[in-house]
Amino acid sequence: MEFSEHIKTANVENVVLRQPLHPPSRGTLCITGHHLLFSDREEEEEEGSGRHVLLLLRNVDAIEKSVENLLAHSGPFCNEGRSQRISGSSGTITIKCKDLRVLQLDIPGMEQCLNIARSIETLSCLDGVSEMYPFFYRPSDVSLQDQWGLSSPENHYSQMKELHDRWRLSTVNRDYLVCPSYPPAVIVPKNTDDDMLEKAAKFRQGGRFPVLCYYHRKNGTVIMRSSQPLTGANRKRCKDDERLLQAVIDGSDKGFIIDTRSSQQALQARMAGGGCESKSCYSGWTRLHRQMERGKALQESLMKLVEACGDESHNMDRWLSKLDNSKWLSHVQTALSTAGLLAECVERDGHSVLVHGSEGTDSTLLISTLAQLIMDPCCRTLEGFLALLEREWVQAGHPFRQRCAHSAFSHARLQQEAPVFLLLLDCVWQLWRQFPLALGFSEALLLRLATEAYVSNYGTFLCNSHQERCALGVKENTHCLFRALLRARERDCYSNPLYEPTELAIWPSVHPQSLQLWRGFFLRWTPQARHLEEAQEEIRNMITEWGKLALS
């Protein structure tokens, strides 16, 4: 398919662009298969270099258009009058982006306006992954032959020598037949064979049998993750699944299962074929329920929050009411407190933990990631944090393509969208704010990741699983975001100049007064956020200069 088929009008002159933090400007608008390009001709003539805006069309979340007849007195029924009426009309396109920007384009000519709008609507929603821009992005300073990704389950296992006595690397999923959303290799207890794993997988939703995601070096306990067991209304059981979990706590008194659903939700799931681990069959395990919202409720929460942030009434009571009604900060609080509970079980009490909800691809990954950040200083460096995201989200099968199909503005009917990854980044920002010296990366990195998950030049967040990425040749035909973020010039921008490593766990406060709205993201296109960003950049420069003076 040629992208040109969807472009009726490729460029338009005398377009007025209105965007946040800038005065209106007049120039030329061009549309290509992947981008919208605006070039400010007037500024270019005056200063020698005009302002350009380059917008990836995948960034468009919603588009609204209106057409105004500037010559309404012309006779609409005669051919000459109609021609005059169209040429004398103009249109306005409002583009609402996934990164929360809102742009307005005033386009002369109704036909040109409608053509541009139709092209944007079509090209921003193309379904084929191989048609997306990461497959066409070719920066001059890197090669497709460069290493893709930071690590692999095989490398992770080989580096963790402490694991080798009791744990092994299994390739039972090498053909993705046991679990479509797992990578080919996973870490499991040493005294379990692959036949046992296959049987346990049939007893877990989507085949996501319990696998190791974190080993605590200090006390040898672990975090496992999985999906819910398929006990059903008849309370079915699977001896192999029970033996698999018993092998995890072999030699210790007990372990904990943190279920990210309420006990009532787990009961309802059992009536629908799912369920949870019974006390009688999993005698060494104690089950704890911590309800976390997911799916539609989480997406609607984001939409309400963004609507509140766009409220221009300047009424404080109304703003606070809308913020509270969105419940977004409640979701942040629940995620951090549940992750704190998980970390407490492992770090303070010395017990292994299994985490799961229903599918095991959303809230499960959220709290396992946060718990590792709380406990493990290796995960708090810039490289360690990116490796953690790769391991716990990209390789572990978070369905990015489904969850990040739309952001907060889309008028499309909600399907499987949910801002779980954005919620993670917000929680990490809360940690970063409460412990400004303990994390080796900056807020700028979190903001970059929040955008990249929805729209990117890179292939890292494409698709829903490792299997899909392999089938579509993502690694062979796109560049890796995490590798790009660790290059020298990027590393300087995304490192925390105040970073002071600590071996101690960082326990977040989850009291409501301790949690704040992530202004850098949700208010990023306001003048206040821009002033804050400039102040942070000035502080960064000062610290860098002090560091140079200290070394001289």
Image (cartoon, rainbow, N blue to C red):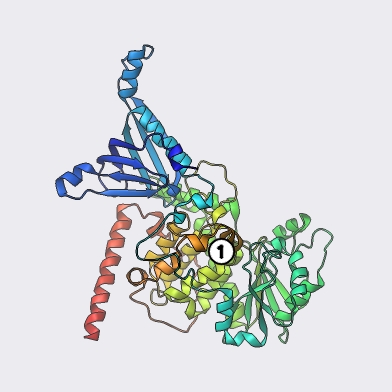
Per the image, the residue denoted by label 1 is: 334
Residue 203 visible in the displayed image = no
Q: Is residue 94 above or below residue 330?
A: above
Q: Is residue 168 above or below residue 238?
A: below
Instruction: Identify which residue is drawn at 74% across, 82% down.
Output: 191
- Picture quarter with the C terminus: bottom left
Q: Is residue 113 left or right of residue 189?
A: left
Pinpoint residue 361: horizontal percent, then vertical percent. Answer: 61, 62
Q: Is residue 354 above or below residue 264?
A: below
Q: Is residue 176 above or below residue 95?
A: below
Q: Nearer the viewer, residue 289 or 223?
A: 223
Q: Nearer the viewer, residue 342 or 486?
A: 486
Dot 1 alpha-carbon crowd within 10 angstroms: few under 14, some 14 to 19, many 20 or more: some
Furthest-left residue in this view = 46
Instruction: Identify which residue is drawn at 47% across, 75% down.
Output: 384
Q: Secondary structure at mark 1?
A: helix
Pinpoint residue 129: horizontal percent, then vertical percent. Answer: 53, 52
Residue 172 visible in the displayed image = yes
